[in-house]
Amino acid sequence: MTTTDPAESVVTEPLEDEASILDSSDPLRSHRDAFVGAETSLVYFDGNSLGRPLRASVERLAAFARDEWGGRLIRGWDESWMQLPFEIGDAVGRTAIGAAPGQTVIGDSTTVLLYKLVRAAFDAAVAADPARVEIVVDRDNFPTDRYLVEGIAAERGGRVRWVDVDLAGGVSASALSEAVGPETAVVLLSHVAYRSGYLTDAATLTRIAHDAGALIVWDLCHSAGSVPVEADAWDFDVAVGCTYKYLNGGPGSPAFAYVASRLQDRLAQPIQGWMGTADVFAMGPSYRPADGMRRFLSGTPPIVGMLAMQDTLALLEEVGIDAVRAKSIALTEFAVRVADQLLAPLGVTVASPRDPAERGGHVTLSHPSMRRVTARLWTQDVIPDYRDPGGLRIGLSPLSTSFAETLAGLRAVEAAVRAES
Ligand SMILES: *Cc1c(COP(=O)(O)O)cnc(C)c1O
């Protein structure tokens, strides 16, 4: 596959040429330089687990500590911090999840927000119809989603109804149709499957849940900032998503919650803290939930954790989620093509959907040696992650990943699979 150009006496590889053409025609290419570490040769394939920081965030964090925390001290709450969860929530709504203002807030971790909102949705569904005692969730949903649903069912006298799925795929319309019915209270699904990258048809699945009379909670952890979401247009009830993945909020940055306006005053969340009350500083004798999204907060908002995500949200606002998705598709298409060419001969298979319309922002490559391959790659500054059984996840965060980086990483995977097989 090697061709020599006699005029320049250089060896060119067709795949390297292709990567370089794709990079030079990529309208988002200049944004990669805005990330810390872009100048190094490190290959980062895990922006879907922990996004790289933007350089602007380094400055923002330092300035915050110095000027706002250090300078304004407790006055900062009145001056700006109390409103920040709502302002940033609205920015998430506007730029990433298709939500009109007043329906999205930055709160606790994804796990805690999902717990609060799945439980609130379950209680609301049971209050409306006591026959609805089931929470529908798939067996390959992210562990925290499965575990918290088991806890809520046990706590509230409900039942979990498990949907079986193909590990290289996800929840289809027909699988969900079979699982829901007159006993369904709530459905909890991931929009993009964390293992396979399967992208569900969220509008259709929402309609299926609604037609069965159930509420649906969407986990947007692997979609926010990578895949367009239209929470309002697709008639979502509730959604929760991570901000430290494609939104580059930093390790443990707090999650966002979306609750459709029409449902907000019907949902009562279980962690009744002072920050969720109507008049926070009235310090009243008992809990009275605020109107609107404030009622889903519990304690003091984690302000430091919500600083960095603002830089990615500003960038998303500038470039638009559709451009991000177009690059994401181009990156995953390229990765699949390279894997077919370099890795399939070694027995590596693609454990993600091949149709880009059914695939989110990562590609999972499967081979029995992948656990050892991952460990070897990390020592070489090539950083994918590993998920059982035998899955190497290639996360291609569109704003911070180039085609050349993708190819260099996959060539390293090829060498590592050879070495470990
Ligand atoms: C990453 C991820 C989570 C993580 O939840 P945390 O509370 O932030 O640890 C939850 N659900 C899905 C689908 C994820 O991908």
Image (spheres, rainbow, N blue to C red):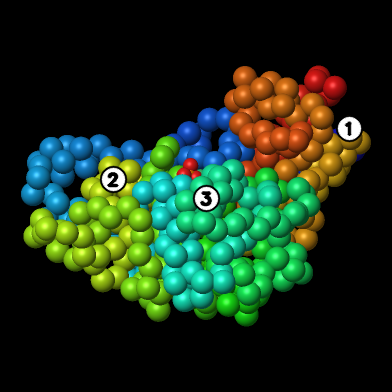
Q: Residue at x 62, y 24 (%)?
A: 378
Ligand 1 within 8 angstroms of badge 2 C-beta: no
Q: Residues within 10 Å of mark 3 (few under 14, many from 20)?
A: few
* Disc on res. 169: none
How far apart marks 3 and 1 lie (CA) works out to 46 Å
- The answer to whether 128 appears left or right of 133 in the picture is left
Residue that carries the numbered disc 3 in the rendered image: 154
How far apart marks 2 and 3 lie (CA) works out to 30 Å
Q: Nearer the viewer, mark 2 or mark 1?
A: 2
Residue type marked 2 = Pro
Residue 145 at x, y percent in the picture: 55, 49
Query: Where is residue 395, by image quadrant?
Result: top right
Residue that carries the numbered disc 2 in the rendered image: 302
- The answer to whether 7 appears left or right of 189 in the picture is right
Question: For the N terminus, which image quadrant?
Answer: top right
Would you place residue 123 above or below residue 396 in this image? Answer: below
Residue 264 at x, y percent in the picture: 36, 72
Question: For the C terminus, which image quadrant?
Answer: top right
Q: Residue at x 81, y 19 (%)?
A: 419
Residue 308 at x, y percent in the picture: 35, 46
